[in-house]
Image (cartoon, rainbow, N blue to C red):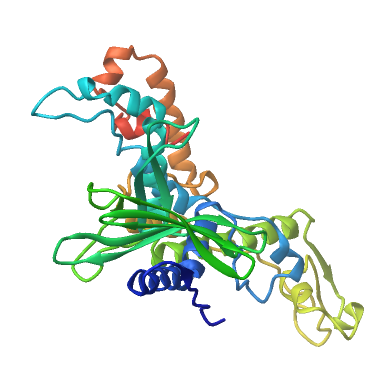
């Protein structure tokens, strides 16, 4: 669907053009931003499932939270405790009130999460209205905010925040941030109008929070990369195959020696042929041994391949991390159980000093419970 340009009454043509550029920018990135958010929230359904699985398995709510773990593990290690000023004491300027009234202890973490998911997040500083703090600091993700980057000044030359949408998702209110003004606009019926224009001399009141920016890509890149999404899709398909595997092997396997194919009928479903638990082998009366011998061979499985791929793409240590328990080998299960048993018998000071148990050092990653 083509982008619908808007014209805001009483707004200069240059500023109208900037508004349309930024609205189109948000709309063009919305599909990919929604996709990455669905991966983070574990709401993305795989598009392709193996042909041997019945259609019913495609409707299972099977998912893994690997992309969310890759984001959250990094956010938990990026904590802002306070700000300092070498030229004086920020407390004398009301910093403590600013921090508490805007809940910056949690809001900064939420902004960091949005930045890792969508590659960019935005923070605005505006004057508070009645019943609000004197100064309001708010964070926005890339679904509701964007800007125009000025490479020479290395900051935004204009920014836009979507304030309200109707039930169909159509924008009905927005705020335009300029270096010398903050403009509020609303839509009434089919027409747009400017409801408030606050002039100031503070510079840009909307700032960019990018993740991994680089030359030519100032808005950064998402931590949920295409390889990570592909690996998570492969893992979900693996779990679907595992569901089918468990259903099939919950019924005992039977062999009918001396039977021929006629006992199964003419029209046999491919799934029943490939994964059927009842098999018939006809006898050969002309052979020396009329009845054949039956052997069983266990199938192999790609054990730790997918978890290791995900750890590598997330820049996490392969020897530590969020491996799915069912993919851990019995040897690792035994080793981990022995290690945890010995760890419970250690004192707190020993654990903090990182004493070894069964060859595994209890680093902070282990102590934070990532293996639980």
Total number of numbered discs in the rendering: 0
Q: Is residue 254 left or right of residue 20?
A: right
What residue lies at 43% left-to-right and 41% top-to-bottom?
332
What residue lies at 18% left-to-right and 67% top-to-bottom?
151
Q: Looking at the picture, how far across and down is residue 351, in whole percent?
A: 30, 19
User: Quadrant of the rendered structure where residue 367 is?
Assistant: top left
Q: Is residue 36 above or below residue 99?
A: below
Q: Is residue 107 above or below residue 160?
A: above
Q: Looking at the picture, how far across and down is residue 248, in whole percent?
A: 74, 60
What residue lies at 38% left-to-right and 32% top-to-bottom?
134
Query: Image quadrant for the N terminus?
Result: bottom right
- Can residue 301 be seen in the rendering of this structure? no
In the depicted view, which residue is nearer to us: 128 or 318? 128
- Can residue 286 be seen in the rendering of this structure? yes
Q: Looking at the picture, how far across and down is residue 29, in whole percent?
A: 44, 69
In the depicted view, which residue is nearer to us: 202 or 287? 202
Q: Residue furthest front?
A: 10
Q: Residue furthest left?
A: 87
Q: Is residue 278 left or right of residue 217?
A: right
Q: Is residue 128 above or below residue 16?
A: above
In the depicted view, which residue is nearer to us: 294 or 34? 34
Q: Is residue 90 left or right of residue 136?
A: left
Q: Looking at the picture, how far across and down is residue 78, in whole percent?
A: 30, 39
In the depicted view, which residue is nearer to us: 192 or 355? 192
């Amino acid at each position: 669907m083509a982008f619908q340009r808007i014209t805001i009454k009483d707004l200069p043509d240059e500023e109208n053009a900037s508004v349309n550029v930024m609205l189109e920018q948000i709309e063009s990135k919305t599909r990919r931003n929604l996709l990455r958010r669905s991966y983070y929230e574990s709401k993305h359904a795989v598009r392709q499932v193996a042909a041997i699985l019945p259609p019913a398995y495609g409707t299972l709510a099977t998912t893994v939270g690997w992309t969310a773990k890759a984001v959250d593990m990094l956010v938990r290690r990026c904590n802002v405790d306070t700000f300092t000023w070498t030229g004086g004491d920020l407390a004398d300027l009301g910093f403590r009130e600013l921090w508490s009234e805007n809940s910056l202890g949690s809001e900064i973490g939420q902004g960091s999460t949005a930045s890792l998911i969508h590659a960019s997040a935005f923070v605005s500083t505006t004057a508070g209205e009645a019943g609000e703090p004197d100064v309001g600091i708010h964070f926005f993700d890339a679904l509701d905010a964007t800007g125009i980057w000025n490479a020479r000044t290395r900051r935004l030359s204009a920014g836009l925040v979507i304030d309200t949408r109707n039930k169909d998702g159509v924008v009905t209110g927005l705020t335009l941030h300029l270096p010398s003004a903050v403009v509020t606009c609303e839509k009434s019926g089919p027409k747009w109008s400017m409801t408030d224009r606050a002039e100031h001399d503070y510079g840009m009141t909307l700032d960019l929070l990018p993740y991994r920016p680089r030359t030519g890509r100032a808005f950064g890149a998402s931590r949920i990369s295409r390889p990570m999404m592909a690996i998570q899709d492969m893992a979900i398909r693996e779990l679907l195959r595992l569901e089918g595997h468990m259903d099939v092997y919950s019924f005992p396997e039977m062999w009918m020696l001396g039977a021929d194919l006629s006992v199964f009928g003419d029209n046999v479903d491919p799934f029943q042929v490939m994964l059927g638990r009842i098999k018939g082998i006809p006898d050969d009366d002309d052979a020396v041994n009329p009845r054949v011998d039956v052997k069983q061979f266990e199938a192999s499985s790609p054990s730790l391949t997918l978890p290791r791929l995900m750890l590598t793409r997330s820049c996490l240590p392969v020897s530590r991390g969020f491996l799915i328990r069912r993919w851990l080998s019995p040897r690792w299960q035994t080793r981990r159980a022995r290690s945890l048993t010995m760890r419970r018998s250690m004192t707190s000071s020993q654990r903090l000093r990182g004493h070894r148990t069964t060859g595994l050092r209890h680093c902070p990653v282990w102590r934070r419970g990532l293996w639980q």
